[in-house]
Structures are given as C-alpha cells and as structure tokens.
Image (spheres, rainbow, N blue to C red):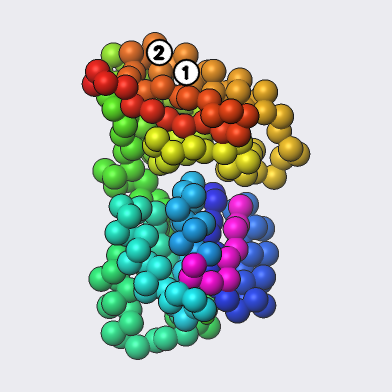
Amino acid sequence: MRLLLVEDEKSLACALETILSDKGCLVDTVYDGKEALKAAREGGYDAIVLDLMLPKEDGFSVLKKIRKRGDFTPILILSAKSEVEDRIHGLDYGADDYLTKPFDPQELWARIRAMTRRQARLPDSILSAGNTVLNRSTHELSSKHGNYILSNKEYRMMELLMIHQARMVTLERFREVVWAGEDKVDSSVIWTYISYLRKKLKALDSNLTIVAIRNTGYSLEVGDDA
Ligand code: CA
C-alpha cells in the first residue's frame, strides 16, 4: 500500500513512517500543505493521512482542494483538535475518517485498512478513458471488445497513465510507483511493460494510445473513435 503522510511534527512523522513501513506500506512524507497538494496531484496513493494544523496551507484547505479536483483517495485526518465541529467539518469536506492525537498507532493502522477496504468497494474505483475502463479493485482492463486482468506492475502503470490522462508520466514517476524500493530500473524495462499494455489496448480495440515523450516519459491519449 502506498501512503502519503502529511505531518509537520517531525518526530511524530518519523515515528509513524517507521510503524507504517513495518506494516509493509510505502510511505511518502511531506511536511506542509503545499507539498501535500503537489504530492497528491502526482497520484498513485492508496490513502492519505493528513494533519490539520500545517504550515503554508492548513489540512482543511488541502482536503477541499483534493476533493475539488475529483480525487477521491481515502483521507484520514489526524489532529490535536478534538472539538466536535472540527470532526464534522473534516467529514463534510470529504474526509473518510478522523483520529485525534494522541492515538495508538495500531488504531491508526486499523483505520487505514478499513478505509482502503471501503474504497475498494466503491463504484468510483473505476477509472475510465475513451472507450476503455480500468477496475481498481479487480485490476481488470476492459472495453466492449473484451477484458484482461493486469499483472500488478501493468496495473500500476495503467492506473498512473489514466489518472494523468493526456499529461506526461515521467520515467522517474513509474520507477517510484511501480518499482518502489527496487534498484534503479532501466528505461528499457519500463518500455517492455508499456509494450505489454499497448498490445492489450490494441487487442481490446481501445481508442487509447500510449505515446512516448522523448526519453522522459509517456502519456495516455484518447483517439477520436470511441
Ligand atoms: Ca501539525
């Protein structure tokens, strides 16, 4: 599971990063609201743990902006504010859960799991572009002409491309998301997986094309006939 942790209190951020990494999560930590928005825009996170009192831009504002973009990544708010109004605000603005500091890290982990399980069952776990659909729960890529269950790496790549439709996904971003924790993967390996996806799209008679952009990345383009 890939998690974005937004927490400006360095010692807490560090402790949470350790605990969540031990659970097998890949954790990216950022320390202010602006960085949080930037990281969330890159996409590919299964969940976001968001502190409320943050430098540069507060958690409520970050939450509202993420939802306004149409990004429904599960978000758990973490805050010292225990007042009822804050909880209500957070949930109204589109947070999925709320945990008040201090908390037991085991409870945080249990809530993250529950939140991501719920997300997997929601209908918006479907990504679509052109005449093609990617199911985020079953990893099935389909069109009216057929379907494929994608391998884990193919799925992660397709998901990134669909989230960033018509915008470039850099080779670096593929390495971070798809080959996280592995040694620097050669661009020819990325190309190989792109070619698997291209073959599947072709077999599905998809109107999506994966376009190579110089030697820096790929983007997903939608063709005319849908
Ligand atoms: Ca804080």
Q: Which mark is residue 198?
A: 1
Q: Is residue 12 left or right of residue 113?
A: right
**Figure check: 65 above or below 147:** below
Q: What SS does tag 2 mark?
A: helix
Circle 1 Cα neighbour tier, 10 Å, few/some/many (<14 / 14–19 / ≥20): some
Q: Is residue 200 magenta?
A: no
Q: Is residue 30 magenta?
A: yes
Q: Is residue 129 left or right of residue 218?
A: left
Q: Type of residue at label 1? A: Arg
**Residue at 38 percent of width and 28 percent of height:** 221
Q: Which residues are magenta?
A: 26-34
**Residue at 33 percent of width and 66 percent of height:** 64
Q: Tell which of 40 and 143 is nearer to you.
A: 40
**Picture coordinates of residue 125, whole percent (x, y):** 33, 43
**Residue at 67 percent of width and 70 percent of height:** 14
Q: From where the camera sits, is residue 84 visible? A: yes
**Picture coordinates of residue 98, whole percent (x, y):** 39, 73
Residue 93 occupies which quadrant of the picture?
bottom left
Q: From where the camera sits, is residue 111 visible? A: no
**Picture coordinates of residue 69, whole percent (x, y):** 33, 55
Residue 191 occupies which quadrant of the picture?
top right
Q: Type of residue at label 2? A: Lys
**Picture coordinates of residue 23, whole percent (x, y):** 62, 56
Q: What SS does tag 1 mark?
A: helix
Q: Which residue is mark 2?
A: 202
Q: CA distance from mark 2 to mark 1?
A: 6 Å
Q: Which image quarter holds the C terminus?
A: top left
